[in-house]
Image: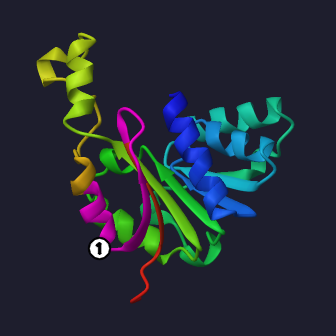
Amino acid sequence: MNGFTQSLESFIRQAAPETINEVGCGEGHWVIRGHALGYRVRGSDYSETAIDMARHNAARHHIDPGCFAVRSIEELDPSHEAADLVMCCEVLEHLEAPEAALRKLRQIPARHYILSVPREPLWCALNLVRGKYLGALGNTPGHLQHWSKSGFVRAVSAHFDVLAVASPLPWTMLLCRPKSDS
């Protein structure tokens, strides 16, 4: 996870945001980390259970639990989600319609976006080496989409200008901006 954290924090520094909106924030780890780094951060997730945990975690760190909201990507209102930086990490692989999610993310006004997914086929291969999910050939339960690095760059490039690509083992992470032709 160190490589992921280093890549993410490097991209955040490059984006130089004041405000960050994490879509698919889960239990709030990166929102809380962003607050610790001095950013104004908020997050949303479709899971009420995850947001309850995020709010609990935030309160433990003396962060306003109100910075978290229960919302799926499909339910986002772009006019209320604007931030200097929008992050969506380890979410798209779980969605039945990732192209629709990318379109929705693109509607959110932001200067930069950070997107990440597991890098295939490496992710599944590493699961097999660990003896995990053998019956599913290493596919993590809930992973509906699988992208190689080049495949993910191609998919995202339809909606964003990709500024930088990082490959922390075993993920693909992209720093993007709104498409210049939009």
Is 15 above or below relative to 92?
below
Front-most of 126 and 163?
163
Front-most of 77 and 30?
30
Front-most of 85 and 100?
85
Specify the segment rendered in magenta.
Answer: 152-171
Residue 26 visible somewhere in the drawing:
no
Question: Which quadrant, please, contains the C terminus?
Answer: bottom left
Q: Position of residue 67 (x, y in %)?
A: 73, 52
Residue at left offset 21%, top offset 55% = 151
Which residue position is annotated with label 1? 158
Q: Position of residue 42 (x, y in %)?
A: 69, 54
Residue 6 lies in what quarter of the image?
A: top right
Is 109 above or below relative to 60?
below
Residue at left offset 63%, top offset 72% = 82
Residue at left offset 61%, top offset 69% = 81
Q: Position of residue 7 (x, y in %)?
A: 53, 43
Marker count (numbered)? 1
Q: Position of residue 168 (x, y in %)?
A: 42, 37
In this rendering, would 138 be left or right of 58?
A: left
